[in-house]
Image (cartoon, helix red, strand yellow):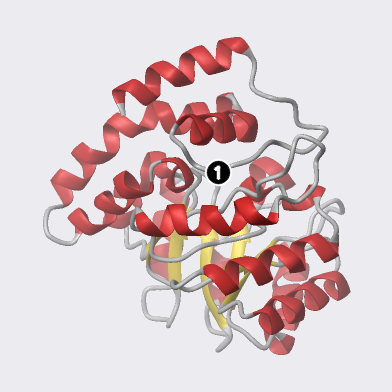
């Protein structure tokens, strides 16, 4: 898994049902615009609002339609749920599993490390660690990641902390391992590539896959150009993540002709203020 992949939004109907035809179409829409891999059932996929059966079906559809690798989100708060979802994803054709830190309970770093080793020991596909403290309140520290990178079935990490300094520490500590550190925010994609990232799993790749992929492709030859391409995307990325969230992202995608579908409750549709602001940013894009 290298390059840029979208944590693929999950299209729902206005009634909140999984829109399977739209999901199939969406896979083609992002692939045609240059993504390197696809991540169903991540945070931007509203995976935590889906049943286990819906998540398995979503992974199955994406794997059927995709011609690029598929990294399926399979993490749950508990080990058994995670292993069941990971096995289902592997059976459905996923190439790797993205496993979020167990949340709800306050686990220390030793407990997190032991948990991920258990997952990696049992998983039939490579495991990527997923640290997203803004959603879970749980952070994998650089020393913990360094220890886990030694496991032969731990292939890499998506770091969505937004802390470039922490990412640098992770990249340096895992540089000698067979381990792919990836960033989870398009706002700092070029900076993370400078720090040793192998790519990014970024929400903006749902909306602007060509633009985010161009940053990655440019970086190998001209890191300064990658930074200049990245900078104008920061406001748009912030709008579809921190400011207006998944509802804003899906509205913006529909405005660009992507079959993104609608949000699932308790999310609410994007309001007028969000739509006006996003429309301005899309014109700039």
Residue 38 % position (x, y): 51, 63
Residue 201 % position (x, y): 48, 55
Residue most extreme to the front: 21
Classify residue 187 by image quadrant.
top left
Q: Secondary structure at mark 1?
A: loop
Q: Is residue 252 visible?
A: yes
Q: What is the crowding at mark 1: few (fewer than 14 residues within 10 Å), some, or many (at least 20)? A: many
Please name the residue shown 18% across and 61% down the image: 220
Q: Looking at the image, which is closer to me, 272 or 85?
A: 272
Quadrant showing the C terminus: top left
Please name the residue shown 45% across and 76% down the image: 179
Residue 257 % position (x, y): 46, 37
| Relative to 221, 10 lies left or right | right
Q: Looking at the image, which is closer to me, 6 or 192?
A: 6
Q: Is residue 75 visible?
A: no
Q: Looking at the image, which is closer to me, 142 or 195?
A: 195
Residue carrying label 1: 259
Quadrant showing the N terminus: bottom left
| Relative to 133, 254 lies left or right | left
| Relative to 96, 2 lies left or right | left
Please name the residue shown 43% across and 82% down the image: 178
Residue 33 % position (x, y): 35, 53
| Relative to 196, 265 lies left or right | right
Please name the residue shown 70% across and 43% down the image: 135
> In this rendering, is residue 156 above or below 47?
below
> In this rendering, is residue 225 above or below 171?
above
């Amino acid at each position: 898994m290298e390059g840029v992949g979208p944590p693929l939004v999950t299209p729902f109907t206005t009634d909140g049902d999984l829109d399977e035809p739209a999901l199939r179409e969406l896979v083609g829409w992002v692939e045609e615009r240059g993504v390197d891999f696809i991540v169903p059932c991540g945070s931007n996929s509203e995976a935590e609002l889906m049943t286990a059966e819906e998540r398995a079906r979503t992974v199955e559809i994406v794997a059927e339609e995709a011609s690029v690798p598929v990294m399926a989100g399979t993490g749950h708060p508990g080990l058994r749920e995670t292993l069941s979802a990971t096995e289902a994803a592997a059976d459905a054709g996923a190439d790797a599993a993205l496993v979020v830190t167990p949340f709800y309970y306050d686990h220390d770093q030793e407990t997190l490390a032991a948990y991920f080793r258990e997952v990696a020991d049992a998983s039939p596909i490579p495991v990527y660690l997923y640290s997203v403290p803004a959603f879970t309140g749980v952070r994998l520290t650089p020393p913990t990641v360094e220890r886990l990178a030694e496991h032969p079935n731990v292939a890499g990490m998506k770091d969505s902390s937004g802390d470039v300094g922490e990412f640098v520490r992770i990249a340096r500590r895992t540089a000698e391992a067979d381990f792919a550190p990836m960033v989870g925010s398009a706002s700092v994609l070029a900076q993370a590539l400078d720090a040793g990232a192998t790519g990014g799993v970024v929400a903006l790749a749902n909306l602007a896959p060509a633009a985010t992929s161009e940053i990655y492709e440019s970086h190998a030859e001209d890191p300064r150009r990658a930074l200049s391409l990245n900078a104008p995307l920061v406001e748009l990325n912030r709008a579809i993540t921190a400011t207006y969230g998944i509802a804003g992202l899906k509205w913006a995608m529909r405005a660009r002709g992507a079959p993104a579908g609608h949000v699932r409750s308790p999310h609410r549709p994007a309001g007028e203020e969000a739509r006006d602001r996003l429309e301005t940013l899309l014109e700039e894009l």
